[in-house]
Image: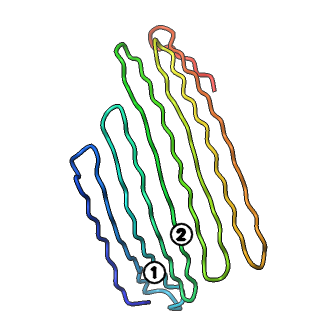
Amino acid sequence: QDSGLEYDAQITLLPEHPYNLMIFARRVEPLVRERASTLLQAVDTSFGALVRYRRRPWFGSAGYTDNSIETGRDITHIRKLDMSGQYHREMGGGSLVSFSGTFAPTRFDNNRGFSGDSSEATLGNVLERGGLRLASNVSRSDFEQRSKIDGSYGSTQFQVREQLTAAFGKGLRARFD
C-alpha cells in the first residue's frame, strides 16, 4: 500500500458490432500532499466485464464488477451485477413504443464483520400516439446490512409513477401525474 501505483486497462472486443465485450482492470491510489496520516490513504481496485447488444429495436447490457477498497487496515469488497434491457420502436405518424427494465444486485463485506446486500430494479414504458403520451415507471430498492456487533437492519422502497400528457391543437398541452 502507499506505492503510488495506478493503472487503468480496458480491452473492448468487437467495438463496432451490435454486440461487444469490454473487460477492465483499474487501480487508483490518490496521493494527497496535505494529508496528516498515511492511514487515510485509500487504494481502490476494480475488475469487471460488460457485454452489450445494440440493434434496433433491441438494446441490452450485462456487467459484473468486483471492487476492493483498502484503507489502512480496513478492506471492503463490493461485487455488483448490472443488467438492463430496452425495446424501443418509433412508428410512423409520431407513434412510439418503448419498454425497459433494469436489475442490479450488489453484495458487500469487510474485514471488520460488516456485510450486506442491496438491489435495485425498475420497469418502465413510454407509449405515444396521436398527441397522447403515457410514461410509466415502477421501481424497487432493497438494502440490508449485517454486523456482528449491531445485528442487522434494512430498508425497502417501492415507487410507482404514471404520467399522461395530452396535446390539444397547436402548442397547447396538458400533463397529469
Position above or below: 40 against 94: below
Left or right: 73 in relation to 97: right
> What element does badge 1 sit on?
strand
Foreground of the two, 142 or 28: 142
- In the picture, the disc for residue 43 is 1
State the residue at coordinates (44%, 61%). Answer: 64
Which corner quadrant of the image does residue 155 belong to?
Answer: bottom right
Q: Position of residue 103 (x, y in %)?
A: 53, 49
Q: Position of residue 49 (x, y in %)?
A: 37, 61
Q: Amino acid at mark 1?
A: Val
> What element does badge 2 sit on?
strand
Q: Mark 1 packing: few (<14 Cα in 10 Å), some, or many (20+)? A: many
Q: Position of residue 81 (x, y in %)?
A: 49, 58
* Residues marked 1 and 2 touching at CB (< 8 Å): no
Foreground of the two, 168 or 126: 126
Position above or below: 19 against 48: above
Q: Looking at this rendering, what residue extends furthest in the top direction?
A: 169
Q: Which residue is mark 2?
A: 78
Foreground of the two, 89 or 62: 62
Position above or below: 83 against 167: below
Q: Mark 2 packing: few (<14 Cα in 10 Å), some, or many (20+)? A: some
Quadrant in the picture for the C terminus = top right
Left or right: 32 in relation to 143: left
Left or right: 117 in relation to 83: right
Quadrant in the picture for the N terminus = bottom left
